[in-house]
Amino acid sequence: MARYQSEFTQFLNELKAERPYLEAEQQAGRALLWDKEPLSVEDQRRAKAAKLKQRAYVYSND
């Protein structure tokens, strides 16, 4: 049982063997969309000052 691999694990292993660059492309895509530098203190202050207060009931036309 220790050597059992599911069909999905086998598929992933074969895919990684066929396309060794796949993981590097995934990491590059993540860096492009998600990994951001932390905001400076000044940027945080400006973002906080620009924020509008939300009304208690947002669906009202008042």
Image (spheres, rainbow, N blue to C red):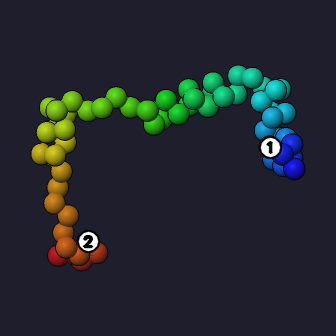
The image shows residue 33 at horizontal and vertical percentages of 48, 35
Residue 8 against residue 28 in the figure, above or below: below
Vertical arrangement, residue 59 with respect to residue 2, above or below: below
From the viewer's side, name the closer residue of 8 and 39: 8
Q: Position of residue 28 (x, y in %)?
A: 56, 26
Badge 1 amino acid: Thr
Tell me the amino acid under the disc marked 2: Val
Residue 29 picture quarter: top right
Query: Which residue is depicted at the point 80% across and 43% down?
Result: 9
Residue 58 got which mark?
2
Residue 9 appears left or right of 50: right
Locate residue 57, reporting x and y percent: 23, 75
Report the number of discs: 2
For mark 1, what is the residue? 9
For this rendering, which residue is in front, 39 or 4? Answer: 4
Q: Is residue 11 above or below residue 58?
A: above
What residue occupies the far front of the structure in this picture? 2
Can residue 42 be seen from the camera position used here? yes
Q: Is residue 35 left or right of residue 23?
A: left
Assign a secondary structure to mark 2: loop
